[in-house]
Amino acid sequence: MNLLDIKYEKYKLQNGLEVILHSIKNIPVVASNIWYKVGSANEKRGKTGLAHFFEHMMFQGSQNVAKEMHFRFIQEAGGSLNGSTGFDRTNYYEKVPSNFLELILWLESDRMGYLLPSLNKEKLENQISVVKNERLERYDNQPYGLAWEKIIASLYPDEHPYSWPTIGFLNDISGYTLEDVINFFKKYYSPSNASLVLSGHFDPERGKELIEKYFSGLPSQNSLQNLSPIKTELSKNKLIHYEDNVNLGRIYLAWHSEKAFGKDDACLDILADILSGSKNSRLYKSLVYDNELAQDVSAFQYSGKLTGNFMIIATARPGISLKMLKDKIFEILNDLGKQGVSERELLRSKNGIKSNFIYSLQNVDSLADQLNFYNFYLDEPNSFNYDLKRYEEVNGKMLSAVTEKYLGRPYIELHILPKKVKT
Amino acid sequence: MENFRGIKPVPSEELDFIVPQIQVFKLTNGLTVYFVERHNLPILRINIISEAGSKFDPPGKKGLSNLFGMMIDEGAGEYTALQLSDEFELLGSNFDIKCTSDNIYFSLRTLKENSDKSLRLLASIITDPHLLKGDYEREQRKVLTRILQLRDDPDEVANTAFDYLLFGKDNPYAYPILGFEENVSQISIEDVKLFFENFFVPNNSALIAVGDITRPELEEKINYYFGSWKSKEINQIPGSIPDDQGLRKIHFIDRKNSVQTEIRMGHLSSKRNAYDFFPKMILNNILGGQFSSRINLNLRENKGYTYGASSNFYYYKDGAYFIVSTSVAEENTASAVKEMFNELHGIRKGVTREEVEFAKSSIIRKFPSNFETNSQIASAMSRMFIHQLPDNHFQTYVDKVRRVSVEQINQASLKNIFPDQMITVLAGDKDKLAAQFAPEVLVEINEKGIIL
C-alpha cells in the first residue's frame, strides 16, 4: 500500500468549474475547499490589497444569505471556516459534520454566483475598517512587521505583480469603491476560474448530484489569460536601512530564485532546511549555538507561479553588529558551496520531509487544500508521490550547484535597527 | 435563478459518532498512562505532561522551570545536545518541549517503524538529562535575550501586565513563564538540578499515547523505557485562590508611536471543577467565544473597530479567570472599551432561547471534529489529566451540554461576569490614550504591571 497515492475523481462542469472528489471514511466530517485563480498578483498599483479585501466581502452574505449568516450557518452546524489570499490564488474552506454537506455547497455556490445583488456601501465601509485594523494589527504594529513589504518592493520592479504586499497599502485600502468590488467579482469569480475539492466522509455519487444541483446553473465568464512572467534580476546589491520599535537588530538577505515546482525549487527547500531547519543546521549551529551572534535564524525558499525568492533572516544578539552576522552568514554559504553537504545532513532533511508528508494526511481540511494546491500548480491533484520524489532526488552536487547559482547573485540586504532614543 | 436557492438545506441523516475509547492505567512508579489505539496511519504520538510548570518558581527565581525545560534536552544519556537533535531528525521524528504555568509538555511524533528508537531518546531525556554548566550558561543567555525581545511584542506586554494585576504579587500565576531578567541572571545550574529532583517525578506526570500501537505493545515499551523513572513524594505547593485585587481603574503601558492599543479586561473566576462549568462555557460561546458571538459582531462587524475581539474563561489547575481581549486603532480605544463594558452589562440582562440553541448546536455538532488528529486526541487527554476529569468525561460531554437551560446560563452570567470588578490593561501610546479618557480613571503601569 502506498499511503501517499491519494485516490480521487476529477471532472469539469459545463461552466468550467473543476471538481475534485476524495472520499475517505474516517470520522464523520467533510471538508470543502475552493481555489479561485486570483491573488494579489492580479491587482494594479493604486488598488493593492483588493484580492484580500474581496475575500472579506465574500463572508458578508449573498443574494440568499443575509449578512453575518454565512458564518452563523456554519458555526451552528459545528463547522469551521475561513479563507486566505496569496500572490497567486484565493481559497475558501469549510469543515462540517458530514450531514451538512449540502449546506456548505449551497453557501459556496450562492456567493460564487450571486454575491453582487447583496453588496452595499455599508458592508463595504465596515470591511474597509476591519481590513485597515487587520493591517495595523498584523503588520504596522508588529515588531519587524513591515520587513516583507520593504523587501519585495526592492527585489521586484514596481510593475512586477509580486512587488506589493497581499494585505495592500493603507491608502489603497481606504479608497476601494463598490465599483472596484463589482468589477473584480465579474472578472475573476467565475466558475471557470475556480476548482472545488471535497475531501472526507461523503458518498461520491451524492456529492456529484449536489454539486450538479448547486453549481451547474452558475453562469461563466470568459476564461482568463495567465499572467506572463516578467524577467527580473538585480544588477547589483541593494542595502536598505529601517528603524523600528525593536530592541534587537535584524538582517534580511533576499535573492531571486526559482518558481514553484521549477527545476531547482525542491533543492532550494532542502538547502533552506540544511541551513536553518534544526539545531545542527549550518547557520543555526554557528550563529546561535556555537558563536551566540544571533538569537534566531531562518532560511526559506518562497516560490509562486511566476517566480521565487530565497531568504535568510537573522536577529542579532545585543552588542553584535549586523555586519558581523552578514560576514558569518556568507562564510558559511561559501563553505557550503565549495565543500558541499554530508550524506547525513542530506538524509536528515529528506527523512524529515518524508515523515511530514505522512503526518499531514491526518486532517481532511489540509488534504483538501493540498489537492487543490497540486491541481493549481501541476494540474494533477494526486502529486504527493511526485512531490516527495523531487526531494528524494536531490543530491550533494545539486545543492552545491544551486548555492553557487542562486546565492552568488546580487541580493537585497535589509537592516532593521532599534529606533535611536532621543535624549 | 433556481427556486431552491431561497431555501437553506437541512442536514441529511443523523450521524453516529463514537468517542474514541480512552484507556487509563498506572505504572508502579505512579506514572499515569492515557491511551487511544488508532490504526488509520502508521504513526504514533507520545506526550508526557509533568506538573512542574512555572507556578513552582520560587520568589526571586521566576523563570526557573522554563530554564529547566530548555535544559532537559541539552544532552542526555549517551548523547550531547546536538547529537540528540540529530538522532530525532534522522528518524523523521518531531520532538518538542513547552513550558506553561502548570506543566511542562514533551511531545513526540514518530513513524511507527521508528517508535522504539524515538522512545529510547525520549526516555533518556526524561530520566537521564546531563544538565551541564556549559550548556546551561548558553541557554541562560538565550533566555535573557528572549526576554528583551518579547518587550517588542505588544500582545505579550499587555498579557504580562494583565496577569500581574489580576493575580497579585503573591500568586504564582501572576508571573511570566520566561521570568524576569534580574531573576534569570541569578538562577544557577544548581537551582535547575534541584528543580529536576524536587518537581520532576512520575507520580506527578502522565504519559499520553495515541496511534498505531496495541495496548500490550504500549505497556511493554513504556514499562521498559519509563519504569525506572523514580517516584518521590513531593511537597506540592497548595494552589491558593488569590484575592480580588480591587483594581477598578484603567491601567496603561506607554508604547510610544504605537498605532494600535492592545486591550485586556477581566477578573478572577471559579475553577474548572465549579458546578456551573457547562453553563459558563455556553455563556461564553454567546458572549465572545466564536466569530458570531456578541462581542465580535459588535466590535468588528458592526463598529469596524477591530480585526477581531473575543472572550474566554481560562482555567489553570489552581485558578481561573475571565478575559476579554482585542486590539484596536489608537483613536478608537475609548469607544471600544465602552462597547466591551456594554456587552458585559448586556449579558447579565439575559440571553435569548435562540442564542442558547445556536451555541449548543455549535458545540455539540463540532464535537466529533475535536477527535480527528492524534494531536487533538492527545490534547483532550491532557485536559483530563490536568483537571483530573472523570474517565467518562467525553462520553457524557454532549449530554451535559444538551441539558443546560436558559435559566442556568442567566444564573451563570450573574455569578461569573462582574463589570464593576474588571481589571483593564491597555498597551498603547500615552498621549493618544490621555486624549480619550478622563485623567482620574487612568493609571500608568510599567511592563511588569507595577503601578508607577
Image: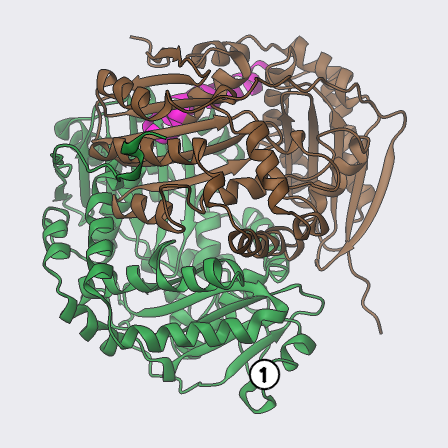
Chain colours: A brown, B green
Magenta-drawn stretch contains A360: yes
Task: Name the residue carrying label 1.
Answer: B437
Q: Position of residue B93 (x, y in %)?
A: 40, 28
The mark tally for this picture is 1
Instruction: Residue A356: name its quadrant.
Output: top left
Viewport quadrant of the C terminus of chain A: bottom right
Chain ID at mark 1: B
- Please tell me which residue is depicted at 71% across the width and 60% down the height of the picture: A245
Q: Main secondary structure of the magenta part?
A: helix
Residue at position x 26%, y 67% in the image: B235
B108 or B11: which is nearer to us?
A: B11
Q: Which residues are magenta?
A: A342-368
Tell me the kind of residue under disc 1: Phe
Of residues B213 and A22, the one nearer the viewer is A22
Horizontal side of A382 relative to A211 (left or right) equals right
Asked if one can make out residue B396 in the rendered structure from this viewpoint, the answer is yes
